[in-house]
Amino acid sequence: MNRMHLRLPSWPSLVQRYGMSCHSTLGRVAIVLLWMATVVSSARGELVTLYSGSGLPSAEPWLVYGFDSITGASQTSVAGGVRLVTDEAARAGYSNYTVIPTTALKNPAFPTLHRANGFELSFSLALTAESHTSSDRAGFSVILLGSDAKGIELGFWQNEIWAQNAGFIHGESIAFNTVPTLEYKLRIVNDNYTLSQGASQLLTGNLRLYGNSQPYSLSNYIFLGDNTTSAQASALIGAINLESNLASVPEPGTFILLGTASLAIRGLRSFRRGQS
């Protein structure tokens, strides 16, 4: 796991590295701009690859495979990821928690998901088959909960993606073709979630508190799969990544600042050549 490292450059090191003089006004401005840009760009979010997209997810350090029926669910390693198949009676999927002998994180190093800092779950999915007997259930769902168990559950049909409301009824939705293999990003910041696919924002809304029963009372919880006996699906799941601490990731303005510093340095060097 890549944790955030913040190593601040010293003032003398910048002067020595870029050959600048801090005795001139332009030199001081250039050093300040460069120092600010370097400080901001040194901050990085925490990125964890929960599943590489090769083999079975449970063979890697972060996720477990859970199921409640021996014959009604299967997982198969295929090109591009893992094929998860469930029938209507079976529930199965992947989570970062074990339930035997006790409910606990599979990997204690799993990052804490602070909503104020923001976090994002990205995953590859192709829903090649899905059916349901209730409009409030889906054969494939994604659950993402923060450190306070507040978060969102999204249901995936082949022609629609929708949010699960508290009370477990159909919430906001969008008509969307989930059959082809696509990369999705589910981001949570403060009290809101956003689901995106590529450059398109698909869904956004308020987070939910789903109640005191497990797994919805768990903190830092992730699930991808079929969690209902009222639906079934065949899903190809590819790479799964989690990025936390989004507040530390540089905004685009950082790179503008870095460019401004570079221009100031060039101007200083040109000015010094003109004086020589």
Image (cartoon, grey):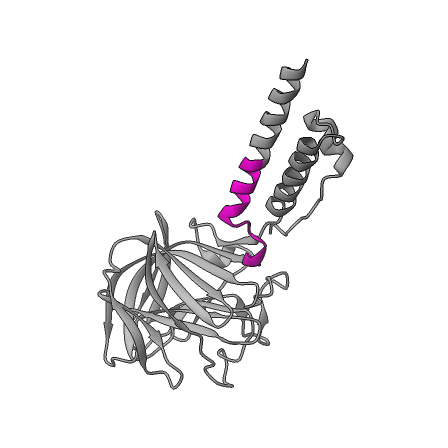
Residue 52 spot, x, y in % from top left: 46, 50
Residue 71 spot, x, y in % from top left: 34, 71
Let me know if residue 157 appears in the view.
Answer: no
* Residue 167 left/right relative to 59: left
Residue 127 spot, x, y in % from top left: 28, 61
| Residue 155 picture quarter | bottom left
Query: Where is the C terminus found, in terms of image quarters?
Result: top right
Outermost residue on the top side: it is 276
Q: Magenta-highlighted stretch: main secondary structure?
A: helix
- The number of numbered badges drawn on the structure is 0
| Residue 22 picture quarter | top right
Give the vertical position of 187 relative to 104 (above or below).
Answer: above
* Residue 98 left/right relative to 232: right
Span shown in magenta: 245-260
Q: Residue at x 58, y 65 (%)?
A: 106
Most foreground residue, 76 or 195: 195
Most foreground residue, 60 or 28: 28
* Residue 83 left/right relative to 36: left
Give the vertical position of 71 relative to 29 (above or below).
Answer: below
Let me know if residue 139 appears in the view.
Answer: yes
Give the vertical position of 146 relative to 57 (above or below).
Answer: below
Give the vertical position of 261 relative to 125 (above or below).
Answer: above
Q: Is residue 209 magenta?
A: no
Residue 118 spot, x, y in % from top left: 53, 63
Most foreground residue, 172 or 257: 257
